[in-house]
Image (cartoon, rainbow, N blue to C red):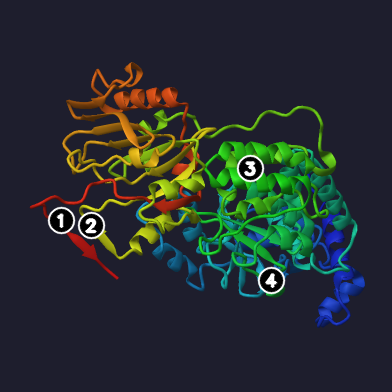
Amino acid sequence: MADTTFNWRSFLTRWSEEWADACDPDDALTDEEEAAQRARWLGFAPASGARIEALEERLGCRLPPSYQTFLEVSDGWRNAGGFVGLLAGTGNARWYEDEDGFGEEFRSHLGEQPSPEELAEAGMWSRALQLDVESDSTYVLMDPQAVSGDGEWAVYCYHVWACGPPERYASFREFMEGMYHQFHYLRAGSPGFINATTRALDAVVEEAWYAALGGEYERAEAALVEPDAFGRPRAKALLGQLRLLLKEGASYSMGFGLSAEVQAQEIPPAPVTGSAGGRHSTVHSPAVGPLWTKAAPFRYTTPGAFGVAVEEAWELARWGDTDAAWSTLLAALPSWQPLDPTHLAPVGLLRDSLLGPLVTAERGRELLAVPRGPRAMTSPRPAAKTLDPGGLAWLADWEPQGLRLSEGYRFVLVEATEPAELPARLGADADTVLHEPMTDWDADQLVHGRGESSTYDDRPLVAVGRAAQRWSFAFDGAARAFDANRFVSPAAAASRGTRAVAVWSTPAGQHRPSSAFHLSVAENGEELYAFTVDGPEVVRSGAVPPALDPEPALAGRAGESRALEAIAAEFGVSLPRFALTSPDCRLHRFTTRSWTRPPGPGETYMVVRWG
């Protein structure tokens, strides 16, 4: 059955004329190519019905529909894309029979349970019809056993010099359309490469840009796919920004279409790889870890009212209030303006050391859905979605990476105190400094860099931030196992002139037969009350308020959750889950005084030094 749904003559004529117009006078053309340029035709004369029948008789099978109808228009083809100089017609199409041993090579790399696709690729070499006649180490093979419902054979294109398996096309027609795209792609960067096709594609890109600015990012992304396949530079720049914010894939190429002005503002120099001059930008997003390198902390800036909001959001995020920071950014987003037509969103936010981790894939969609710049709207928009549950109860269910990795957690809350003031209240000594915002990984390296660890001295490196409007917190998410005999609450020292609350929770595990939970509250340097639940034992001191009384004894996660809810309600406090649990979030940190007393007479301890 012939393929009558596609106009091969029109398609091949357009391709030929665009190729002829794109030839540079300095190009080294062969005699045949010069003749093709003059004739404005890359093909040959049509194959007669007799020639097609003779080929089918020689091969012993019927040709797939799209290849047959192609031959009826041109008996072969020159310059199919960038790496195939001549495609076979009726006279030189032949069975490949794996003459170069690629099938054996692919079979040797099959795993114990190869997929149907891998088996097809490995077996294709011995049965395929070879269509490449002249090429740059490129094979074009049609598989007679990979047949679709309409009789088309799958086409495999394999570049010897490329890594990975052959590229698969559903039919010969799809392969030729792909080679036409490749022809455009390889010439897209040339200023003089302009024709009816490029003008039509660029009009689609312009419309997609306005759609994206209007919040219709899904429509914009779908519209940009074809211009990107044709290599239109602006399409690649815009699509790269969309996919960067949507977190689609592991790397995002901006191509050559991103202007120098946008690159200077949005794309950092250090994490970018590409051509000389930095014009070709590829942003890498590893499967784990932050989007940008840990070694180069960066603070994003941008002009105008949105730039002011970025500064406000940065101040909020540095103290853990990531939900408020995101709401601030989203509220100001309509005021954001693109620098030029290659710019569609403030993607530079993603490389900001503090604000970048806030932009999850869901929030990327949320950002892109807001009309902005010339498409900003004054109508009300949905409020930003929160990622923090509020309160403290979430700590009872906190299991990083699905496992309770640490011995537990502990924190100190101080009323009427700014986070930056906590080192003066809780610091290990008078010289304690507040470190610049860092991730948990950075904090681990800093602790390891101390070069010493003691079994009695317990001075954690804590993250700090705001726990509520009038409270600040110091939090340690990798606490040692609680030891009631040696514990010294930091609440009293932290409460000079105010109130302070200390909490320590340790689950049952390798170092403890039962869980433990401690609460102590102090004011003006004196402990008001405290309790410790250690398995079935409850120890109280002072007048514990009824709302906080641990009876019935705390048992398991449910009891711990109830205790945390009561503490949050009693003091009106909350800890930011996202900032404290996201591996890429950065918070200020400092080293506290020891949470355990010095060793007493006759007590032994061990000090380990390294480095």
Q: Quick one: label 3 or label 1, which is nearer the N terminus?
A: 3
In space, the residues marked 4 and 1 are separated at their CA atoms by 72 Å
Residue at screen point 66% across, 29% down: 383
Vertical comparison of 377 with 54: above or below = above
Location of mark 4 (residue): 83
Q: Give the camera-side residue of 501 and 345.
A: 501
Quarter location, residue 259: bottom right
Q: Amino acid at mark 4?
A: Phe
In the rendered view, does 348 fall on the left or right side of 491? right
Side of 393 where 596 appears, left or right: left
Q: Amino acid at mark 1?
A: Tyr
Q: Where does label 3 land, which residue?
A: 364
Q: Between disc 4 and disc 2, whose residue precedes?
A: 4
Residue 611 visible in rendering: yes
Three-letter code, disc 3: Gly
Q: Residues within 10 Å of mark 2 (few under 14, many from 20)?
A: few
Mark 3, residues whose alpha carbon is within 10 Å: few (<14), some, or many (≥20)?
some
Check contact, mark 1 vs mark 2: CB within 8 A: yes
